[in-house]
Image (spheres, rainbow, N blue to C red):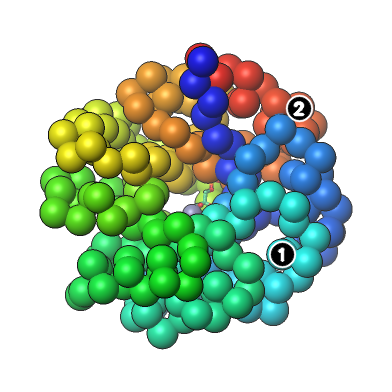
Amino acid sequence: MKNTLIAPSVLAADFANLQRDIEMVNNSNADWFHIDIMDGVFVPNISFGMPVLEAITKHAQKTIDVHLMIVDPDRYIKTFADLGANNLAVHFEACTHLHRTLQAIKAEGMKAGVALNPHTNVALLEDVINDVDLVCLMSVNPGFGGQSFIENTYRKIRQLKEIIARNGASTLIEIDGGVNAQNAVALVEAGADVLVAGNFVFRAQNPTQTIAELKAMTSL
Ligand code: DX5
Ligand code: ZN
């Protein structure tokens, strides 16, 4: 049986009740905390930074999956390791020396991730795939929660799955943006291993139950 990992995106949490929302995730069937860091340069939005991440990690009891939507991410690799990130994903489009960046992330004891914008072809990862622990396929344009899912993502998942298999890699495929109960099963059937969900979880009437439902329907 496939154990799909569910990663609620804290971007959609209630920041005035952050501890409550973190505890909700701790006590749910969720597997990871997905943390979106935006700099207002790589993406047209600013989310939150180090002090907020520090507050999150103080309470979070699950894997901290950080998604950096920032230019020049190399400058902050050590900072995020020190703050307790377990996974650190940088954007392909923000890295001139991606191979070096991935090694630097691993040298700090974190899992190395690469995030791809919707327009970026997965074939560009072929020569580095054995060094990548996690590929975060953006199924919306990064920068905002609550956008609608881009259907072309299914094709990218299948192509990426093939590249991973061909190279004997054990890279996880994470889908980020517009994930909900309507597309979750099809995403997993296409090859997704991790589903990020922001608004679908935190805007639900019962977020704990919504996480449980997502987990159950995708553990095929
Ligand atoms: C978008 C972020 C996503 C976002 C997902 O730039 O990377 O992680 O929080 O939110 P939803 O699930 O609401 O699309
Ligand atoms: Zn994200």
178 lies left or right of 85: left
Q: Is mark 1 within 8 Å of ligand 2?
A: no
Which residue is at 70% across, 41% downward?
Answer: 203
* Residue at the image position 20 percent from the left and 75 percent from the top: 96
Q: Is residue 148 visible?
A: no
Dot 1, how many residues are within 10 Å of its Cα: few (below 14), some (14-19), or many (20+)?
some
Asked if residue 96 lies left or right of residue 8, the reply is left
- In the image, residue 188 above or below residue 143: above
Q: Three-letter amino acid code at disc 2?
A: Gln
Q: Amino acid at mark 1?
A: Thr
Per the model, the C-alpha gap separating discs 1 and 2 is 23 Å
Q: Where residue 67 sits in the image (x, y, percent)?
A: 47, 60
Residue drawn at (63%, 40%) of the image:
31
- The residue where tag 1 is placed is 57
| Residue 17 versus residue 215 in the image, above or below | below
Residue 196, above or below 103: above
Q: Which mark is residue 17?
A: none
**Residue identified by numbered label 2:** 209
Mark sitting earlier along the chain (1/2): 1
Camera-side residue of 21 and 182: 21
Q: How many marks?
A: 2
Measured along the vertical axis of the image, is residue 77 above or below residue 32?
below
Q: Position of residue 43 (x, y in %)?
A: 39, 68
Query: Circle 2 — which element?
Result: helix
Please provide percent x and percent y for residue 160: 24, 37
- Horizontal side of residue 88 vs 202, given as left or right: left
Residue at (34%, 43%) from the top-left corner? Answer: 171
As helix, strand or loop, the secondary structure at mark 1 comes to helix
